[in-house]
Image (tube, rainbow, N blue to C red):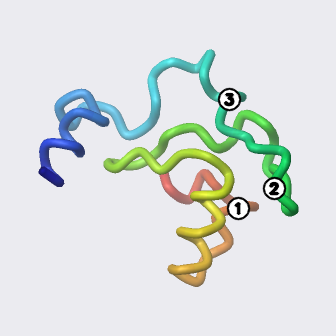
Amino acid sequence: AFLANVSHETGGLVYIKEVNEANYPHYCDASQPYGCPAGQSAYYGKGPIQLSWNFNYKAAGDALGIDLLNNPYLVE
């Protein structure tokens, strides 16, 4: 199931970021106490498992000990 999800999210392992740029601003939940410090359009799906939304970048960064909230492009 994991590899099927990776294949689906990356268009058959072709893309490492979300293709539809019109969706990029959608992934900023400004109601979070930390907001979207890297900009409203910075938290789109990136990586083979398509990490998206500012709160997921924060959680993943906290778990990894990396500041992904302020540096979301490290996922690419």
Q: Which mark is residue 32?
A: 2
Total labels: the figure holds: 3
Residue placed furthest toward the bottom: 65
Label 3 crowd (10 A; few <14 / some 14-19 / many >=20): some
**Left or right side of 30 for 55:** left
Q: Amino acid at mark 3?
A: His
Label 2 crowd (10 A; few <14 / some 14-19 / many >=20): few
Q: Position of residue 61 (x, y in %)?
A: 59, 71
User: Camera-side residue: 28 or 19?
Assistant: 28
Q: Position of residue 35 (x, y in %)?
A: 85, 53
Q: Amino acid at mark 2?
A: Gln
Quadrant assignment, res 13:
top left
**Label 1, on which residue?**
69
**Label 3, on which residue?**
26
Q: CA distance from mark 3 to mark 2?
A: 14 Å
- Closer to viewer: mark 1 or mark 3: 3
Q: Secondary structure at mark 3?
A: helix
**Left or right side of 75 for 42:** right
